[in-house]
Image: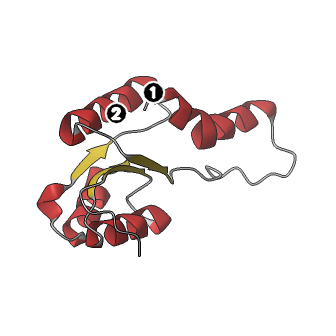
Amino acid sequence: MLNLKDKNIIITGASRGLGSEAAIAFSKSGARLVLIARTKEDLESVRKICKNQNRHLSVAADLTNSSQLNNAINDARKFLKIIDCVLHVAGGGLGKRDPLIEWQDLLLLFKFNVVIIVRSNI
């Protein structure tokens, strides 16, 4: 495992799956984390599993909403002071499974999986 002692890391999509697994592993390696996802309760469950849970912050935000994205990043900056790394795990298909996806749905998926992290100004 990498030595992440005292590294300040933001993890999006941290409430489940790969995001939650990364949060738990990174906390064991000494990182200080800001966990971001839509559901506060799920984030808090992950934060409480993390080693040294009081060194971490959970921020509920829908990252497809620009103002919530900006607020989440501002909260992360205030908490961490310096951001060493962002692990953008939020993403996926948002339930869009049609192989002949509509243009608007394609744009939404691109925004959710790529544009969010670019717009975060981190």
Q: Label 2: which residue?
A: 73
Residue 104: x, y in percent?
73, 30
Task: Choose between 7 and 43: the one closer to the eye.
Answer: 7
**Corner quadrant of residue 115:** top right
- Furthest residue to the right? 100
In the image, residue 46 above or below residue 103 = below
Mark earlier in primary sequence (1, 2): 2
Q: What element carries label 1?
A: loop
**Which residue type does callout 1 highlight?**
Asn
Q: In this view, does 62 lie to the left or right of 74?
A: right
Q: Residue at x 44, y 61 (%)?
A: 19
**Corner quadrant of residue 41:** bottom left
Residue 49: x, y in percent?
23, 72
In the image, residue 82 above or below residue 5 = above
Q: Label 1: which residue?
A: 121
Could you tell me how far apart the alpha carbons at marks 1 and 2 are, in whole angstroms?
8 Å
Residue 30: x, y in percent?
25, 66
Q: In this view, does 14 lie to the left or right of 114?
A: left
**Which residue type does callout 2 highlight?**
Ile
Looking at the rendered structure, the number of numbered marks drawn on it comes to: 2
Would you say the residues marked 1 and 2 are in contact, meaning their CB atoms lie under 8 Å apart? yes
Q: Which of marks 1 and 2 is in front?
A: 1
- Furthest residue to the top? 67
In the image, residue 98 above or below residue 68 = below
